Structure formats: C-alpha cells, structure tokens
Image: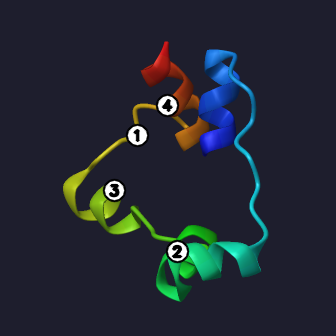
Amino acid sequence: MAALAGGVRGAKPPMRVPRWLARLLAGDVVVTMMTEGRGFSNAKAKRELGWELRYPSWRQGFKEGLS
C-alpha cells in the first residue's frame, strides 16, 4: 500500500528492511502485523445491508482518494 501511495504522489518507493533487523528494532508483534496478510470480507454488509462499493478495488479507491 505504501508503494502505491508513493507511486501516485511521485515519491520514491519505501525502503525495505530485512525481517531480522525489523524484529530487532521493532519486535516480533510489529513485524508480524506489518508482514502478515489480513484478509477480510464485505460480503455480509453487501448481503444484509445492500451495501455497494464505490470503487471496484481498494487500489482504485486509494488513487481517487489521493488525487
């Protein structure tokens, strides 16, 4: 996400830090939160509330929000 935000704004991509170094500096919990996939579903909101997406993907919405 940070790379996409930087690309939209014309900034350099974020610096990468080796996982072992990040664990040393920030701890296991922080590294796990920053590197683990956290999937979720909006199916229930669509089904039960009739909710419709404004943008077909988070990437498109992110670009629109930054512009």
Eye-nearest disc, 4 or 1:
4
Extreme front residue here?
25
Residue 20 vertical placement versus 34 (above, below): below
Label 2: how many Cα within 10 Å (few below 14, some 14–19, many 20+)? few
Q: Residue at x 68, y 22 (%)?
A: 11
Q: Residue at x 35, y 42 (%)?
A: 52
Q: Earlier in the sequence, mark 1 or mark 3?
A: 3
Tag 4 residue:
61
x and y, in percent, of residue 45 in the image: 28, 60
Q: Quadrant of the N terminus?
A: top right
Tag 1 residue:
53
Amino acid beneath label 2 = Ala
Q: Looking at this view, is 19 or 10 the one in front?
A: 19
Eye-nearest disc, 2 or 3:
2
Question: Which numbered circle lies on residue 46?
Answer: 3
Q: CA distance from mark 2 to mark 3?
A: 37 Å
Amino acid beneath label 4 = Gly
Q: CA distance from mark 4 to mark 1?
A: 10 Å
Q: Earlier in the sequence, mark 2 or mark 4?
A: 2
